[in-house]
Image: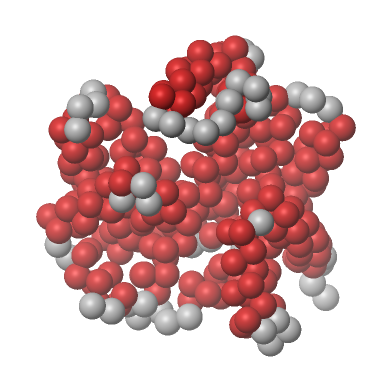
Amino acid sequence: MSNRSFASWIVDRPGPAVLVTGLLGLLPLLGLGFAFFLPGAVPALVVLMRGPRAGALVAAGAAMLLALAVWFVGRPLPVGLTYATWVLGPPLALAVLFRRTESLSMSLQVAVLAGVVLLLLLHLSLGDPEQFWAPLVRDLAAEMQRRGLPMDLEQDHVVETLARTLWGWVTVLTVLLAMCALFLARWWQSRTGQQGSFGAEFQRLRLGIALGTVSAIVIAVSLLTDRPLVDDLARLFLGALMLVGLAAAHRFKASGRLGGAWLWLIYVLLVLVAPIMVAVLAGWGFVDNWLRSQRRAQPQT
């Protein structure tokens, strides 16, 4: 079945859409971590093509299936519902926003701002993240050691580092996975009669002058200070600028300034040496975002 046929088939059949979303939601639980963004793409597609109500019904049905699946393997129902809300809720909200604005850039900007608000609420209301998460992380570390993990997590300071940065990583992953789900849903939609429209939209992705400037300041401050909140905000902005950098790479490829092999190499390196490539793409994204935002801000003559 082609992607065009899949998109047309899934949006016209709520029952199969719920089942497919639920099955895709099980993939990360089976160890396929890269698949976290897949389940949210289906209700997001339904929102784009059938409206928010239809998409919300698909997400709600799939959430119940996922909760029951998690309960079936011995975990409480609230755990399954929390997981389902995490993988389905943000993509659904971004799809509703995109349906109204038809702007991937606006969707990214709102997602980043929502991430900023979430981090502020977590840090201001719950205090030091290391003290909050350390007991749970130590329990998880002990369980991993009982399963034969060949490293001393306490000696390597993994527990403290993970506890200190957990809120930031969860927020960054939530934003990135939601955006990737929206990208996939929009690509599926474009295959039903708007060939090439998603590529052009993605290549115009930007963060804007205001958020771009704030991101540079926050990242610079995080390099000079040791504040958990600032570090978490910097990770969020780095993730957003990385997406802008990837969009710039695709635009360069479309215009012939970058070969297809180089684009593939970027993705391979993003998997193999993620920290370096995230920094490189974020830097590219910042420069590209600034230059294009400046051109948009100049008065037309």
Residue 167: image quadrant is top right
Instruction: Report the residue at 46% width, 62% height from top.
Output: 183
Residue located 64% across and 14% down the image: 128
Looking at the rendering, which quadrant does residue 156 occupy? top right
Quadrant occupied by the N terminus: bottom left
Is 243 in front, or is 261?
A: 261
Residue 169: percent from the left, percent from the top? 57, 36
Q: Nearer the viewer, residue 3 or 290?
A: 3
The residue positioned 54% from the left and 60% from the top of the image is 104
Q: Does the rendering let one see residue 93? A: no
Q: Position of residue 71 (x, y in %)?
A: 19, 30
Indicate the quadrant containing the C terminus: top left, top right, bottom left or bottom right. bottom right
Please provide percent x and percent y for residue 23.
Answer: 23, 52
Position in image of residue 59 (x %, y %): 26, 45
The residue drawn where x is 46% and y is 20% is 142
Q: Quadrant of residue 249?
A: bottom right
